[in-house]
Image (cartoon, rainbow, N blue to C red):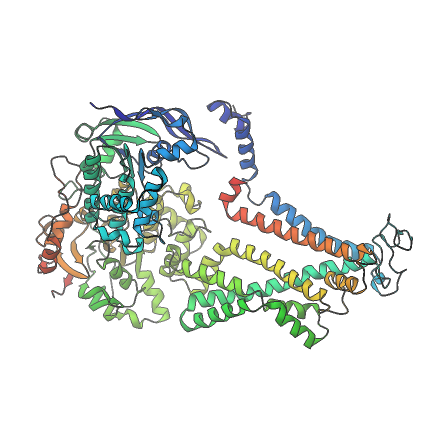
Amino acid sequence: MTSPVLTLKDLSIEFPTPGGVVEAVKALDLTIEAGRRVGFIGESGSGKTTTALAVMQMLAEPGRVAGGSIDLGGTDILALNDEQMRRTRLSRVAYIPQGAMNSLNPVMRIEPQLWDAIIAHEGRLDRAELKRRSDAALESVGLPVHTAQLYPHELSGGMKQRVCIALGIILTPELIIADEPTSALDVVTQRQVMQTLKDIQEQIGSGLILIGHDMGLMAQSVDELAVLKDGELVEHGTVKQILEAPKHPYTQDLISSVPLVGGESFLNPDRRAEAPKRESSEPLLRFEGVSKTYGAVTALHPISFALQGDTPQIISIVGQSGSGKSTMGSIMLGFTPPTTGRVLFEGQDLAKIGASQNLEFRRNVQAVFQDPYSCFNPFYRVNHALSYPYKRFGLSQGKAQTQAAMEEACAAVGLDPDLVLPRYPHQLSGGQRQRLIVARALMLSPKLLIADEPVSMVDASLRATILSNIYDLKDKHGISVLYITHDLATAYHVSDYVMVLYKGHVVEAGPPKAVIGDPQHPYTQLLIASIPWPDLQRGWGSGLEDGAEDNIASAAPAFRGDVAGFELAKA
Amino acid sequence: MSNFSTDDNVAEATQPMTRAEKRQARRMRRFDNPWLNPKLLWGAGLLLGIVLLGILGRILWNLDLVFTGSATLKLPPVGFENLRRQPGVWDHPLGTDGSGRDMLALIVIGAPNSLFVGLLASLIGMTTGIVLGFTAGFVGGRTDDVIRVLSDVMITIPPLLILVVFQSAFGDVSLTMMALLIAGFVWQSPTRLIRAQVLSMKQSGYVQMARLSGAPTSHIMFREMLPNLIPYLFGSFIANVTTSIVTAVGLEVLGLGPQRIPTLGRTIYEAINAGALIQNLWWWWGIPTLLLAVMFIGLLLINLGLDEVSNPRLRRLS
């Protein structure tokens, strides 16, 4: 055993607020050995980030360490003054932030930002020496040397995150703290970035704290796990111990809440509701050669399909960011006009819809968006978002009835209406807000719901609940759903039909058991290989295989059988 | 337990709070209701004082004293002597000016007038700004280009120059006319501010949600967006009142503006013109200046207070 790089003894952190002192972290004891990777896992608000920030002495005002000690490789962090702490940051303990997108200075090239880090700790060095070290740092994270001359906006999200890692390791610190470094990235990039981080950490032999809420990612990335709940360390042990024999019920919940491809379903389909009777025999939604280009960029290549809608179905559209899936959702909602082709809703062209029919169309096609935080007007109590459309669509029969309908919808998604409805949006968690949006859709009972990444910004432990709420819309209320996602595991469970999009093309389509259970197109295979499994036996690969791109581009699309009620034109 | 205050509960739960922490906690409690902000209250109090001066003065004081020659010339305020060794008298507690007008009557009429011009000009400017800003942000395209270029060009033109030309051409103008003229120069910054906010809000989730709810454009503009702009609008409004008063007083001190209606600026103009500075008639120009200072400090405090109300982070730092 090597000597510990970080020892937390009896650490407590509190925030004095007008309502009294909030204890964010309670009596935390933890030791991190050199060269070990430790995962901090827990929901938002569990104190993971607060602990990490305390190690950096970067707690947000008015937070403070109330008791205990932080020992970094023999130095008592709490005894350091500001200047000593400044010298310690980055050179001995580095922090890789969550939003790498916003952590780089947008008006500086990458190279001077790396140099700044060295100069701030070692004083002015020779230009050639600086260049040698910054190039070495970039190479060590797998970036080409010419990246140094680029501005942050010229890099992709994954590349920016790697630059942040390069910044973190440039002074070979004893401890690296990575705060959800991949939460804003899609699965394929996530795997590459995590691999980079693991490699570099092994190379310089430092300790690593990985903060996150995804059990699968943790299982594939760390040696030890610390499970936090409400500021308390509820369980700590090696990944193997925790995954195979979780002791605390909360840990068991965390593990079982991860949806798996081929695993047990988290849904409980109890009855199949009939779709509401429709007058027209036209398909509910029909795309006729729809495409979308933005200038020279083609977001969506011509695609044609028809969703009959006589039996409620969930159609999943899967792909990475930039695959055109959100553009497709926006076209369906009539927010973005297609460049070519027509979108028909019950035989009616969306482009030629009149004002009176528009209201009817809006009533029938509703959406759940990705970001539950922005979906509520901060000026109003949340019930405004539910009652306004209800009245607007003429469904309301008086105040009492509206209230009753809202309460019923809340109860149906598992929220306590008395607790939730009279609140302001900032008083609710992301999960509660997203469920309210689902409740809103339920209240309006549209014929079609477009769910655009409904769970990607919600805590992992709540994802299953929200998805089963959405599944119930189909199962109990007969609403057809278009589920847009990058997460194959959830698509596998909820959907009746899956389309995989790659750069605006459908590359594989068919029933989920075929497409996701036994992928044939190399892109689908790559997506599935990139999912981190909470299972140590299942390797994660490096994600850096060469030639994968060429393979994907040249492979022919694979169509894997049909489902009644949904026809995709095979082009 | 129930008869303990929150403070005691907190202290019991952890170690006793230090004095600095107690002060901080007290400050936070005081700001639980953000509108009870001391800066805001003081600012509003000062402005209210000016308004009260106008109302009570009209009731309690003889306003006929504002006419030329209604009293002895150049009398000092009570308790002072002028160069001719005349003491101040209680008939004219703030003294008289060079043509025998009572200073108290002058400010009773003049001070609210200056505030009125500022408020009216700012109100008109804001309304124009809201309409144009929303139109530009919402309609976009050509309309947006026209409005944007127009406001950008107008922002570069020095208002005093144009106003001097206008006023000399018009000769005598009424207060309302003057407010209208000034309003022509205070609509640009609210227009730009609101346009920028509308553009960013148009992309926000709740506006998309409202569109999904089949909301008409007017609902999106005035029920979804406008309420969230209120802090900006308030701040911008107060800043505009200050600008408008400064512009109005500037014109009046130059001898432009209304000729027959007493205003603070005109009083200062007459004082300068009659050589009040050389003759040591300090009350003639000093009292109107003091009132203007009170007005500006009041407006500044309101603006700072509103900033803290709408931005909780500033509140905690104070």
Quick check: B223 above or below A55? below
Residue A286: x and y, percent? 21, 66
Front one among A559 and A546: A546
> In this orientation, does residue A345 appear?
no
Q: Is residue B157 above or below residue A23?
A: below
Closest to the observer: A530 or B6?
A530
Q: Name the outermost residue toward the bottom.
A: B169
Q: What quarter of the picture does the N terminus of chain A occupy?
A: top left
Which residue does the image show at 77% across and 57% down from the upper left?
B285
* Residue A112: image location, x then y, percent: 33, 49
* A513 horizontally vs A298: left or right: left
Q: Nearer the viewer, residue A194 or A567?
A: A194
Q: Is residue B253 visible?
A: yes
Q: Is residue A268 above or below residue B170?
A: above
Quarter that holds the C terminus of chain A: bottom left
Residue drawn at (65%, 51%), measured in percent from left and top? B298
